[in-house]
Amino acid sequence: MTRTWPEKLATDEGVLAWEFLDFLRETAVLKVDGLTRDQAAAAPIATSPKLTALGLLKHLTAVERYWLCIAGAGLDLPSLWQGDPDPSWYLEDDDTPAALIQAYREEWANAEALKKLDPNATAADGERTVRWILAHVAQETARHVGHLDLLRELADGQTGE
């Protein structure tokens, strides 16, 4: 797995936004890849008992499904946020690092439909632009990558950029 920094002399804002999201996605995967299931399912922060590396990856998959695929591109896919509280944080027995990394990557493929739309266009939900949705998902992913940095360091001491 390799991450590629976005083009430093970028001139196309839309391409740059997607490159940064791709960079953040790969960073999230790298933070979970190599952990055992027990390490990735651990919730080491007492005040946040649902905050696990696997839960974060499931949540990021649900974020992409809803915002990029459903609200943004209008794809006819089921939401992964069915229920209250948000079930994307809860782990099932078959939620392993490999399985959730694969599910997350599969959601990236679904989100390709949004790349085909004009960033200034109104998204499928009719409430915001495609540009807004992409920026929202990038900021949400970046925030959770920060959580994953901490969880990875607590799990096995690995740090990185």
Image (cartoon, rainbow, N blue to C red):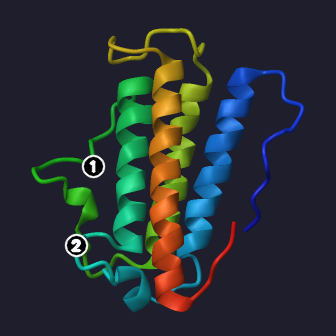
Tag of residue 123:
none
Report the residue marked by disc 1: 80
Residue 74 visible in the snapshot: no
Location of residue 47 with respect to 139 vertically, above or below: below
Task: Please state if 20 lies on the left or on the right of 45 as rendered.
Answer: right
Q: Nearer the viewer, residue 137 or 80?
A: 137
| Mark 2 or mark 1, whichever is nearer to me | 2
Report the residue marked by disc 2: 47
Task: Please state if 86 lies on the left or on the right of 137 as rendered.
Answer: left
Q: Residue at x 73, y 68 (%)?
A: 1
Asked which secondary structure carries label 2, the reply is: loop
The quarter in which the C terminus is drawn is bottom right
Q: Residue at x 27, y 42 (%)?
A: 79
Q: Nearer the viewer, residue 52 or 71?
A: 52
Q: In the image, residue 80 lies at what x, y percent?
A: 27, 49
In terms of sequence position, does the residue under pointer 2 or pointer 1 come before the other? 2
Whole-number angstrom distance, CA of label 2 to CA of label 1: 25 Å
Residue type indicated by callout 2: Thr
Residue type indicated by callout 1: Leu
Q: Residues within 10 Å of mark 2 (few under 14, many from 20)?
A: few
Residue 155 visible in the snapshot: yes
Q: Residue at x 43, y 25 (%)?
A: 72
- Which quadrant of the view contains residue 55? bottom left
**Label total for image:** 2
Asked which secondary structure carries label 1, the reply is: loop
Q: In the image, residue 125 lies at what x, y percent?
A: 32, 18
- Which quadrant of the view contains residue 71? top left
